[in-house]
Amino acid sequence: MTFNGLVRRLKALRPRVQSAFIVYLRPGGNPVDDVDPSVAISDVTSPADPMLEEITVPWQRERARKELAAGAWDIVVAVKDGEPVGRIWETWTSERPRFSGVPRVRLSGDEVLMFDLFVAKGHRRGNVAMTMASYFFDKYGEDSGTDVRYVYGFIDYENAPSILWHHSIGFNVVQTINYVSIGERIKWKVPFSDVPRFGPMSRRGRHTDPDVELFGTQLMPQ
């Protein structure tokens, strides 16, 4: 590693305190009417899927293989001209390992967490993200036959594209938190920073009382 590379690495590992929205959606009918027909969407569910080599870095690939094998994760991948151009990771399990790069969100049995929404450079002004959103509604919406009632997302305050995407398909804010970020693998909630103190980032939430209906403010004002 060069000296400049070492400096960049040390900067990346410098602890930072960041703020985030925890958002939720109760999937119903599909509101997306502008998709890219040249983008194919598929689910990566097998640890042996060759697509993993293209969409993960080594440390993440090792974790993904374990979670895929356990049936705890899957990855929605957008493919255009034979190349992966977007992805959304999903999980149904709570209390993931502390060094997995995933916030430790607690989930009820009828909830899903989406994390690490990504669209490759050169495709971010197209309809890749909305095409993935359309697939998501077909997968979990009212005609899907699944028992998923709520889907959560995790958005940094500074991630304007992600805020706009989540807002455009109807996500609302259920909680806000502060968290410590170190590199790609550590996202730890600052104690007592969860507001309100009932939700997926708290000791109490639908994971302790599944009969509760969620409510929250819009991500952006109308």
Image: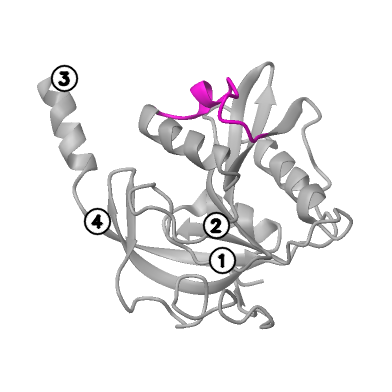
Asked if one can make out residue 164 in the rendered structure from this viewpoint, the answer is yes
Q: Nearer the viewer, mark 3 or mark 1?
A: 1
Q: Looking at the image, which is closer to me, 96 or 39?
A: 96
Where residue 170 sits: x, y (%)? 70, 63
Give the mark nearer the N terminus: 4 vs 1.
4
Give the mark nearer the N terminus: 4 vs 2.
4
Residue 1 badge: 3
How far apart marks 4 and 1 lie (CA) works out to 26 Å
Give the mark nearer the N terminus: 2 vs 3.
3
Quadrant where the image shows the N terminus: top left
Quadrant where the image shows the C terminus: bottom right
Asked if the residue at tag 2 contacts the one at tag 4, i.e. Cβ–Cβ closer than 8 Å, the answer is no
Q: Is 2 on the left-hand or right-hand side of 88? A: left
Q: Amino acid at mark 3?
A: Met
Where residue 185 sits: x, y (%)? 33, 45
How dense is the environment of label 1, judged by Cα within 10 Å: few (below 14), some, or many (20 and up)?
A: many
Asked if the residue at tag 3 contacts the one at tag 2, i.e. Cβ–Cβ closer than 8 Å, the answer is no
Q: Which residue is mark 2?
A: 93
Q: Amino acid at mark 2?
A: Thr
Residue 107 badge: 1
**Furthest residue toward top:** 82
Q: Which residue is mark 4?
A: 16
In the image, residue 145 sits, relative to residue 122, either above or below, namely: below
In the image, residue 180 sits, relative to residue 121, either above or below, namely: below
Q: Nearer the viewer, mark 2 or mark 3?
A: 2
Q: Is 19 on the left-hand or right-hand side of 111? A: left
How dense is the environment of label 2, judged by Cα within 10 Å: few (below 14), some, or many (20 and up)?
A: some
